[in-house]
Image: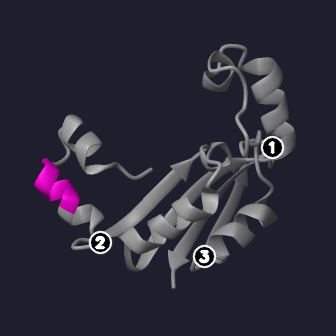
Amino acid sequence: MGLSASSAAEKGGADADDGGAFLNGHREIAAHAHVACLNHIPNRSDVLKESHRLLKPGGRLIIIMINPILGGIIHNIWWRHSEDKIRGGMKDGEVGGMWNSSVNYLVSSSGFTLLYKLRFNLQLVSLMVFQKV
């Protein structure tokens, strides 16, 4: 996920001026990843459009996502003390997981094309690599 200029500075990755230049599009990045988090972002489309803006032409967007069945099991049974439970449950717009077709549609609608997809963990988790077009 992207960092704001202030959070980048707090993490030692950049000072505020450096982060500001990055966030204002003066620099572009080659790859960006959403690892098991896109389902927890209510404004997914806005976030993906921002990923598109930050990536250089031909840049890669990497997404790892669990499907809704596994997500339901994990979020409701297995992860009894998960972050979403601690904050009182899922918020509006959050889902337990996403189907590959939904991820592909959403990401493609934001200006990316699917390059590669790999399923693992009994075909329940997917790694998808997209390219900025």
Residue 119, above or below 129: above
Would residue 93 appear left or right of 57 to someone viewing this image? right
Neighbours of disc 3 within 10 Å: few (<14), some (14-19), many (20+): few
Q: The residue tagged with tag 1: helix, strand or loop?
A: loop
Judge depth for marks 2 and 1 and give the one in front: 2
- Range of residues picked out in magenta: 15-20
Judge depth for marks 2 and 3 and give the one in front: 2
Residue position for label 1: 122
Residue position for label 2: 28
In this view of the protein, which residue sits in the foreground, 69 or 48? 48
Q: The residue tagged with tag 2: helix, strand or loop?
A: loop
Q: Amino acid at mark 1?
A: Leu
Q: Are marks 2 and 3 in contact (CB under 8 Å)?
A: no
Place residue 94 in its image quadrant: top right
Residue position for label 3: 115
Magenta stretch encompasses residue 72? no
Q: Amino acid at mark 3?
A: Leu
Residue 86 coordinates in the image, percent (x, y): 63, 16
Give whichever of discs 2 and 1 has the lower sequence position.
Answer: 2
Residue 76, above or below 80: below
Q: Which residue shows up at 24% across the image and 63% down it?
A: 22
Residue 33 coordinates in the image, percent (x, y): 48, 55
Q: Which residue shows up at 43% across the image and 60% down it?
A: 32
